[in-house]
Amino acid sequence: MTPKKIKRLIVLEQAQSTNTVLKEMCRRGYAGFNTIVYTENQISGYGRRGKFWHSEAGKNISVSLSLQGFDGDELLSLAAGVFAVEAVKAVCGEGLPLSIKWPNDVLLGGKKLCGISCEKIGGDFIVLGIGVNVNNEGFPKGLEDTATSLYLQTGKNWDLVALRDEIVARVFAGFSIDILDKVRQYCVNIGQNVRIIGEKGVIAEGKAVDIAVDGGIVVLLSDGTKKNYYSGEISLR
Ligand code: ATP
């Protein structure tokens, strides 16, 4: 993934979902590669397999970017996690306990700070969506134990646009050669015992031992064999 020039930044007062808006624009030819759609008021964002992503007006950021498909795009969700981690560190300080949970979450103090959604659409487009909880003072029932924000961790309010710009700059700078090392460095799953959950429940158990060059997670199964799993098929617990 090579450096890209931003074509257009579209700031919306509100959006159902920045990914949905940008996908539609790309499909209709209203937007090309390297366009950004941004809002601070996302009404019905979503993550993997359409799972709801909670937003609170004016408190968090939702940014989507249209990228051209490239070799190695399986790594994009994880790379986006690294970009988000580095952007948060640049804005809020190096010392924050940030990590990446395979395949698409950024954690702060072990709780979810960012959601990342990566969708391939026709015409070689990839729409990458990143949601970050910034100044949220709390979360609705069901999320309060698992979600966090930069405000909850640091006790301070942060500039939403500064954080957006740091994330966008990193995505458009592209992957550096050491991106996989960075993913491995931040990935919390490596070394953990994991359950591989398929559509019908647990399909295997083992220990996550590595991230493969193509973004799969390498699991040492209880029968001693190693197997790579991919985010399209499974969840980890
Ligand atoms: P999980 O994180 O539960 O393993 P996942 O990675 O497949 O699942 P995503 O699609 O990344 O899930 O994100 C959606 C999930 O994140 C929701 O099901 C909900 O549990 C949680 N969630 C929703 N909104 C937020 C938010 N603003 N902050 C943190 N977590 C959220």
Image: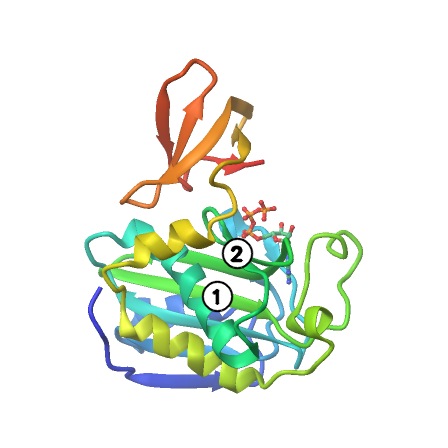
Q: Is 72 in front, or is 69?
A: 72
Q: Which residue is drawn at 28% across and 74% down?
A: 173
| Horizontal arrangement in the rendering, residue 200 relative to residue 210 (left or right) | right
Q: Is 61 in front, or is 154?
A: 154
Q: Which residue is drawn at 19% across and 53% down?
A: 71
Residue positioned most to the right: 141
Compared with residue 183, is residue 148 higher up or lower down, i.e. above or below? below
Amino acid under disc 1: Val
Q: Is residue 119 visible?
A: no
Q: In which quarter of the image is residue 122?
A: bottom left
Compared with residue 134, is residue 236 higher up or lower down, i.e. above or below? above
Amino acid under disc 2: Ser
| Horizontal arrangement in the rendering, residue 61 relative to residue 102 (left or right) | right
The secondary element bearing badge 2 is classed as strand
Where residue 176 appears, x then y in whole percent? 25, 64
Residue positioned most to the front: 95
Look at mark 1 in the image and give the residue it sits on.
85
Where residue 225 appears, x then y in whole percent? 36, 18
